[in-house]
Amino acid sequence: MWNELVDKIKAKTREGRELSYSKGAVGITALLYCPLKHELRQKHPDFRADAVEIDDGFVWEKQVKEALEEMFGKSFEEEKVLEMEIEGLKIEGHLDTFVELEDKVVGIELKAPKWIPFTRVPSEEEMEGNLLIDTERKYTKVNDLYITQARIQKFLLEKLYPEKKVEQFIFLKSMAQYKEWRKKLYIIYPVEESISEEELKEMVRKFKEDKSPRFPIECENYCEYYRQGLCSGKEFAFEDKSYDEQSDEIKNLLKHYRELQGELKTIEAELKKKLKGSILLGNRKIGWVEREVVEIDIDKLLKKIPPSKAEEYLQVKWQKKREIEKRFPSVVREKKKERVWRL
């Protein structure tokens, strides 16, 4: 019963949401991710990513589109097709919602992410009716990919309507979060600058020539084709830079991370003082938790384990690996370099 119910819910949320592209055309989102995704879509047209967030996004789109159609009638258009050829590549974007007025056109891209990080908490007056219009973009940290997509849409709208003012927005419905503060909000995020033609040409060039992920965790975290075994993944080309070369946004994020780290250490120190034992939080014990410690006699264990089974039971201490490499070079099976995340 329940599986059937969920399947019907999924089907209903996706009704009327099948987008089609003309032959040889590439969608805007294809430029933002690994180009292999676009190729895999052509090879597996029936494959669909499956996530509750995607279903929520479709429901959100339907709600906004129906409301805008009631408000603007024939001036409103959903899934407005934006076409242009750049460097021999036909780009065909689908703008979620579009309104054409006498003196201007308005493009609105709709998003419903799980949560949105905030840089500070807005006042209650600014969130009246659970709506935040972040005109100066001083609260919301919107996903860079959303912004780039909207900047491309704005660029294409300006080419289509050179005689009119073009306004572009990202309209989000999500959980806003800053430290311990959380609130579900409707958020209007204005996109002031369109992408430049030079930036777009560079994106197209990379799309045609560089068949690799666009960010380090794309395969594992953002590709359903990889998770389903339809793609074996590609190595990301890392760039090592000095701290001074990084953008202000990255520096601010690092600063915020360190501040939170310090705050967490202070809170943990207070908890260690206040808790005299342990408490049950949900199904997890926290605090001064008693655990069983077993000490193994390594000499006796080595006599018991057959050499062929040693790897199943023993692991070399990482602090001793350099010493072993120098003293017993013949035992080194392989030396390689790998990337790990460190903060």
Image (cartoon, rainbow, N blue to C red):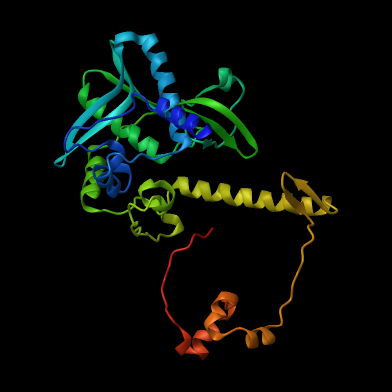
Q: Quadrant of the C terminus?
A: bottom right
Farthest-out residue, front: 1
Q: Is residue 111 above or below residue 221?
A: above
* Residue 109 at x, y percent in the picture: 37, 27
Comparing 126 with 177, the one in front is 177
* Residue 242 at x, y percent in the picture: 43, 60
Can residue 24 be seen from the camera position used here? yes
Q: Is residue 138 left or right of residue 150?
A: right
Q: Is residue 151 above or below residue 308?
A: above
Q: Residue at x 68, y 83 (%)?
A: 298
Q: Is residue 182 left or right of residue 272?
A: left
Which of the 4 image quadrants contains residue 21?
top left
* Residue 68 at x, y percent in the picture: 39, 14
* Residue 38 at x, y percent in the picture: 27, 44
Q: Residue at x 50, y 85 (%)?
A: 325
Comparing 244 with 166, the one in front is 166
Which of the 4 image quadrants contains residue 7?
top left
Q: Is residue 274 above or below residue 290?
A: above
Can residue 137 be seen from the camera position used here? no
